[in-house]
Image (cartoon, coloured by chain):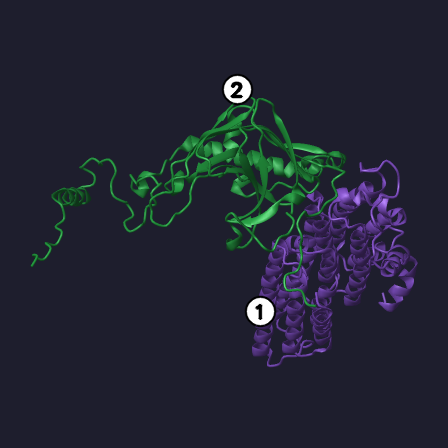
C-alpha cells in the first residue's frame, strides 16, 4: 500500500519572492523596483506574447510640456487647413481638378517619415514566433517589409494555427484626434507598385463601421507577387474585393463603399515558414474608365421563394 | 422586397401621416409619427448593406428620441393645462419642448447632425421618401401649435439656413448635398412659421416638388457623386439640359419656381420689421446657391472625361418611368407666374 501523496509544498523560492513583494508593498519608496514583477494588475491573464508588466500605471505617465505645445500647434494647423480648404473646393481641390482626377497616390514611401503612417504586427502578439520589420528601402525610395514567418502555434492550449505577418496603415486623423476617412468614390481601381518574393499576399481594406460587431470587417483580395528583380504594377478593381470578418469570408456579400475608407493592409499567412520580403513603391487609386463591373460576386438570394 | 410587404409598409407610411393630419389629440398625433417611423425602417434597411443598416439605426434613434420628447411635452402640457388638445397649447414650456422635438424629427439645425449621414446611407428612392413624405407629419403639428416663441424660431431658421449653406460646400456626395439643401430649406420654412403659417406650407410644398425632381433626376442618371453627375450628358442629353434649371430652382433663382417662396418670405420678414434677419437669410441662400451652381456647372458646362469619344453612351437606357419626372420638372421650372394666385390664396 503506497503512502498518500504529500501535498505539494510551495517552494522556498516562491516563499522568499512573496516575502520580498510584501516588503516592497510596505516600503515602496525606499526599496528599488526589481526587474520583472508579477502582473501589476493582479488577476489579468497575460497572453504568452505580451511583455510583462513592469511599471505601476502612474509610472507610465510622461509629462512633457514641449510635447504638449507641439501637439496644440499641430492640431491648430490641421484645424486651419480644415477651415480654409473648403474655400478652394471640395476636399481642398478646385472642382475641375476633382472631376479630372484620374490617379491619386495615397501612400508612398519616400523617407523615414512615411513609415509613421504604417504599423506592423505579427503573431508574436499571440505568442507565436514570426518576426516582421518595416524599414525604408534603398535610396529612401521604397518601403521594405521583411521578416520571418513561423507557423509554430503558441503553446497556450487554445491556438491551433499560427503564422501571419501584417502591415496596416494608420487611421487618418483630423484636428484634435478626430477620425478622417479617405474618399475614393471617384476611383474604381487600386494601383500598387510592388516587388515581392513570389509569395501570395492578401490586401485588406478597412472601411468605417458603426456597430462594435463590425469592428473586424475587412474587404480582402489577393496579391500574387512575382519574385524577381522587376517591379510589378498591380491594378485591382475595387469590385473584386470581398467581405470577410476576422478572416472568414462572409455569405452575405456586398460591394465595398468607397466613401469612408480607413485603412489598407497587407497580410501574409501562406503557411510557408521562412523569410519573406515585400518592397512597396507606392499605393494609389485610379479610375479605369473601361472597367464597368459593379461587383464581381453573385448576390444571389439564399432560400429564394419559388 | 416582396410586393405584399412593400404594400404594407407604404400603407403604413400613408396611414401614419394621415393619422397625424387627422388628429386633435396629442397621443394620436404621436402615434401617427411612430407609425411613420416604424414603417420606413424596413424600407431603409432593405438592402442589408452595413451602411444602410447604420443609417436605419441612426434614424431610428433620433426619431425615437424626438417622439419621446414630444410625448413628454404633451404630457407636461396635459398636466399644466388639463387637456390634450393640439390647438389649445398655451403654456410656453411644452410649446418650446415640442418645437425642439419636431425640429429633431425634421432635421432643423441645431438638431440636424443625423440627416447627412442617414441620407448618405440610403438609396435614392428611400432618400426621397425621407426628404419629402416624412416631413409632412411634423410640419402638420408645427403649423397647428403656432409657436409664438419668436427668438427660438428665428434662431432655428437662421442656424439652419447658415448650416445648410456652409455644410454643403465641402461635399462631393450628392445625397449629402441634398441633405444640407433640405436643412437650408427647412430653415426658410421655420423663419416665417409664426407670421404666416400658410406660407410655411407653400414653401414646404414647393420644396417637395423641387426635391422630387432632383432625386428622380439623380436616380435616372444613377448618379451618387459629382463625377457621375458630370456624365449625365452622355446618357440623357435632354434631361441634362434641364438639370441646371432644376438645381437653380432649388437655389431660389428667379424666374424659376424656387424663387416664389423665398420672395414671399423675405417680403413678410421685412413687413414684420425683421430686416436684418431677412438679410442674413438672403445671404445664406447665396451659400447654398454656390453648391447648386457647382453641380450645374459640373453637369452641363463641362465635358467630363468618359469612356467614349462620342455622344450617347452604350449604357442601356434606364427603365425608370419618366412621366413623374417630366411633370415635376415642369412644375419646378415654370410655376413662378402663379405667384399672384398663391399670394391671394395665402391672403397676403
Q: Is residue A137 shown to the viewer in this render?
A: yes
Residue furthest front in the image: A1
Label 2 sits on residue: A138
Of residues B15 and A14, the one nearer the viewer is A14
Q: Which image quadrant is residue B2 in?
A: bottom right
> Counting other residues with Cα less than 10 Å from the Cα at mark 2, is it few (<14), some (14-19), or many (20 or more)?
few
Compared to residue A46, the image places residue B26 above or below, namely below
Which residue in the rendered view is the most extreme toward the bottom?
B82
Along the line of sight, the residue nearer the viewer: B200 or B333: B333
Residue furthest to the top = A139
Residues tagged 2 and 1 counted as in contact (Cβ below 8 A) = no
**Counting other residues with Cα less than 10 Å from the Cα at mark 1, is it few (<14), some (14-19), or many (20 or more)?**
some
On the same chain: label 2 and label 1?
no
In percent of the image, x 77 and y 44: which residue is there?
Answer: B228
What colour has chain A?
green
SS at circle 2: helix
Chain B colour is purple
Identify the subunit bearing mark 1: B
Distance (Cα) linking label 2 and label 1: 63 Å
Residue A174 in view, yes or no: no
Quick check: A144 left or right of B121? left
Q: Would residue B244 appear left or right of B56 to someone viewing this image?
A: right
Residue under label 1, please give it. Answer: B68
Q: Position of residue B41 (x, y in %)?
A: 64, 65
Q: Which mark is residue B243?
A: none
Amino acid at each position: 500500500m503506497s503512502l498518500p501523496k504529500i501535498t505539494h509544498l510551495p517552494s522556498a523560492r516562491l516563499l522568499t519572492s512573496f516575502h520580498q513583494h510584501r516588503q516592497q508593498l510596505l516600503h515602496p519608496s525606499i526599496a528599488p523596483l526589481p526587474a520583472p514583477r508579477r502582473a501589476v494588475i493582479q488577476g489579468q491573464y497575460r497572453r504568452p506574447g505580451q511583455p510583462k508588466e513592469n511599471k505601476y500605471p502612474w509610472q507610465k505617465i510622461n509629462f512633457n510640456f514641449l510635447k504638449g505645445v507641439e501637439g496644440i500647434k499641430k492640431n491648430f494647423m490641421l484645424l486651419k487647413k480644415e477651415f480654409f480648404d473648403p474655400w478652394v473646393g471640395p476636399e481642398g481641390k478646385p472642382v475641375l481638378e476633382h472631376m479630372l482626377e484620374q490617379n491619386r497616390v495615397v501612400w508612398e514611401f519616400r523617407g523615414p517619415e512615411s513609415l509613421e503612417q504604417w504599423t506592423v504586427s505579427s503573431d508574436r502578439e499571440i505568442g507565436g514566433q514570426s518576426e516582421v520589420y518595416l524599414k525604408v528601402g534603398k535610396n529612401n525610395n521604397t518601403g521594405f517589409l521583411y521578416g520571418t514567418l513561423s507557423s509554430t502555434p503558441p503553446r497556450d492550449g487554445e491556438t491551433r494555427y499560427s503564422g501571419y505577418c501584417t502591415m496596416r496603415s494608420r487611421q487618418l486623423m483630423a484636428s484634435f484626434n478626430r477620425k478622417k476617412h479617405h474618399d475614393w468614390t471617384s476611383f474604381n481601381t487600386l494601383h500598387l507598385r510592388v516587388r515581392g518574393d513570389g509569395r501570395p499576399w492578401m490586401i485588406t481594406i478597412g472601411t468605417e463601421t458603426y456597430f462594435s460587431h463590425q469592428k473586424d470587417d475587412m474587404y480582402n483580395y489577393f496579391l500574387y507577387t512575382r519574385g524577381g528583380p522587376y517591379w510589378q504594377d498591380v491594378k485591382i478593381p475595387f469590385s473584386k474585393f470581398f467581405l470577410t470578418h476576422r478572416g472568414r469570408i462572409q455569405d452575405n456579400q456586398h460591394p465595398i463603399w468607397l466613401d469612408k475608407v480607413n485603412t489598407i493592409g497587407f497580410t501574409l499567412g501562406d503557411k510557408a515558414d521562412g523569410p519573406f520580403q515585400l518592397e512597396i513603391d507606392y499605393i494609389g487609386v485610379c479610375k479605369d474608365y473601361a472597367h464597368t463591373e459593379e461587383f464581381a460576386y453573385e448576390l444571389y438570394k439564399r432560400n429564394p421563394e419559388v | 422586397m416582396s410586393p405584399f410587404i412593400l404594400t404594407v409598409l407604404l400603407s403604413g407610411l400613408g396611414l401614419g401621416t394621415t393619422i397625424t393630419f387627422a388628429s386633435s389629440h396629442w397621443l394620436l398625433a404621436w402615434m401617427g409619427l411612430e407609425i411613420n417611423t416604424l414603417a420606413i425602417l424596413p424600407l431603409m434597411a432593405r438592402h442589408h448593406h452595413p451602411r444602410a443598416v447604420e443609417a436605419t439605426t441612426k434614424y431610428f434613434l433620433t426619431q425615437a428620441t424626438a417622439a419621446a420628447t414630444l410625448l413628454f411635452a404633451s404630457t407636461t402640457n396635459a398636466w399644466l393645462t388639463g387637456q390634450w388638445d393640439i390647438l389649445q397649447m398655451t403654456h410656453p414650456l411644452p410649446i418650446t419642448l415640442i418645437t425642439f422635438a419636431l425640429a429633431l424629427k425634421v432635421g432643423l439645425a441645431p438638431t440636424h447632425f443625423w440627416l447627412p449621414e442617414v441620407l448618405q446611407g440610403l438609396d435614392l428612392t428611400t432618400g426621397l421618401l425621407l426628404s419629402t413624405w416624412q416631413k409632412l407629419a411634423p410640419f402638420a403639428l408645427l403649423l397647428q401649435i403656432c409657436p409664438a416663441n419668436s427668438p427660438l424660431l428665428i434662431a432655428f431658421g437662421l442656424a439652419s439656413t447658415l448650416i445648410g449653406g456652409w455644410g454643403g460646400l465641402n461635399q462631393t456626395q450628392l445625397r449629402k448635398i441634398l441633405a444640407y439643401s433640405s436643412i437650408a430649406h427647412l430653415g426658410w420654412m421655420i423663419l416665417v412659421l409664426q407670421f404666416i403659417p400658410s406660407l410655411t406650407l407653400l414653401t414646404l410644398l414647393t420644396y417637395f416638388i423641387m426635391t422630387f425632381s432632383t432625386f428622380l433626376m439623380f436616380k435616372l442618371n444613377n448618379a451618387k457623386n459629382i463625377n457621375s453627375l458630370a456624365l449625365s450628358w452622355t446618357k440623357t442629353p435632354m434631361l441634362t439640359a434641364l438639370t441646371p434649371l432644376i438645381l437653380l430652382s432649388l437655389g431660389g433663382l428667379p424666374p424659376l419656381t424656387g424663387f416664389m417662396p423665398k420672395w414671399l418670405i423675405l417680403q413678410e420678414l421685412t413687413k414684420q420689421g425683421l430686416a436684418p434677419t431677412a438679410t442674413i437669410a438672403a445671404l445664406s441662400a447665396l451659400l447654398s446657391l454656390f453648391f447648386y451652381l457647382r453641380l450645374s456647372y459640373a453637369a452641363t458646362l463641362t465635358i467630363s472625361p468618359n469612356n467614349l469619344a462620342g455622344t450617347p453612351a452604350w449604357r442601356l437606357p434606364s427603365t425608370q418611368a419618366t412621366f413623374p419626372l417630366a411633370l415635376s420638372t415642369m412644375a419646378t421650372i415654370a410655376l413662378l407666374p402663379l405667384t399672384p394666385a398663391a399670394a391671394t390664396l395665402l391672403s397676403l
